[in-house]
Image: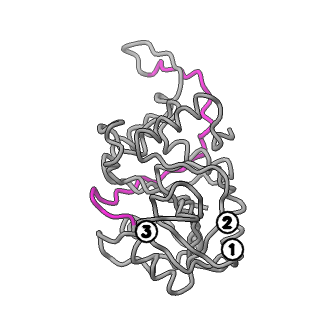
Amino acid sequence: MKVVILCGGQGTRIRDVADNIPKPMIPVGGYPILWHIMKYYSLFGHNEFILCLGHQGSVIKEFFLNYEVNTSDFTLILGDIKSKKFHNKIDEGDWKITFAETGEKTMTGARIRKIKKYIGDDQTFMLTYGDGLGDVNIDKLIAFHHNQNGVLTLTGVRPAGRFGEIQCTDEGVISEFNEKPQTAEGRINGGFFVCNRGLFDYLEDNDDLVFEKEPMMKLVKDKQLMQFNHDGFWQPMDTFREYVLLNSLYKNNNAPWKKW
């Protein structure tokens, strides 16, 4: 199943960490957080990725175009580029990555709409943000989505309430979605979506379309937005504090998402 990753935002809240690279390229344990996300999906057998690029997308392209150089030890005789010899085995050799330029200032809903052609005839695909890590059971998430028969399933998590609050029935049908209320209790949107291609019917041709607003509200109204509950680890990287936290977990071999 294809995995769409939103990588185009400017990450204004975390510019005190790095403002010369896009947010998905900020490192955790020496590798971009984007790489960790892709590595995690790959553990479940999902190796085909569509990256929705925007702000400083060329940095992401450069990293993967020179992947072996960026991630391996190698020996090189200067003046003889063909002499380059890598000393590491690349475990990610079966990854297929589509780099989609979706616009510098395009909003999330429009970025998703712009990659429709890369989904092909697939009836289902996955979607997530390029700045959040978790130990979500992807197999169970997909099975839940297929059993619910909704257009979109999101993963509901329980961190501190500064994001969007969601409420749902016992059957997993979302009855209310508030993107950023003044107070938040219960679960919030943690990303890790599974989508039917019918999602594109909810995405208008408008570069200012925010996925988490009008499209989700319409899905709620149509009872097509479902919630998969995740009580394990989930952590975004929006601030310097969260950057330090994720790197500390990785450094101390206590990173719940690192299962490779």
Q: How many neighbours does mark 1 have within 10 angstroms: few (below 14), some (14-19), or many (20 or more)? A: some
**Residue 23, percent across and down?**
39, 45
87 within the magenta span:
yes
Q: Mark 2 and mark 1 in contact (Cβ < 8 Å)?
A: yes
Q: Write down the region rendered in magenta.
A: 82-108
The one nearer the camera, 131 or 125, is 131
Q: Is residue 17 left or right of residue 142?
A: left
- In terms of depth relative to the viewer, which is nearer, 161 or 86? 161
Amino acid of disc 2? Ile
> What residue did someone put label 1 on?
146
| Amino acid at the residue labelled 3 | Glu
Sequence-first tag of 2 and 3: 2
- What is the quadrant of the C terminus in the image? top right
Residue flagged by tag 1: what amino acid is it? Answer: His
Left or right for 82, reference 169? left
Q: CA distance from mark 2 to mark 3?
A: 24 Å
Q: Which mark is residue 179?
A: 3
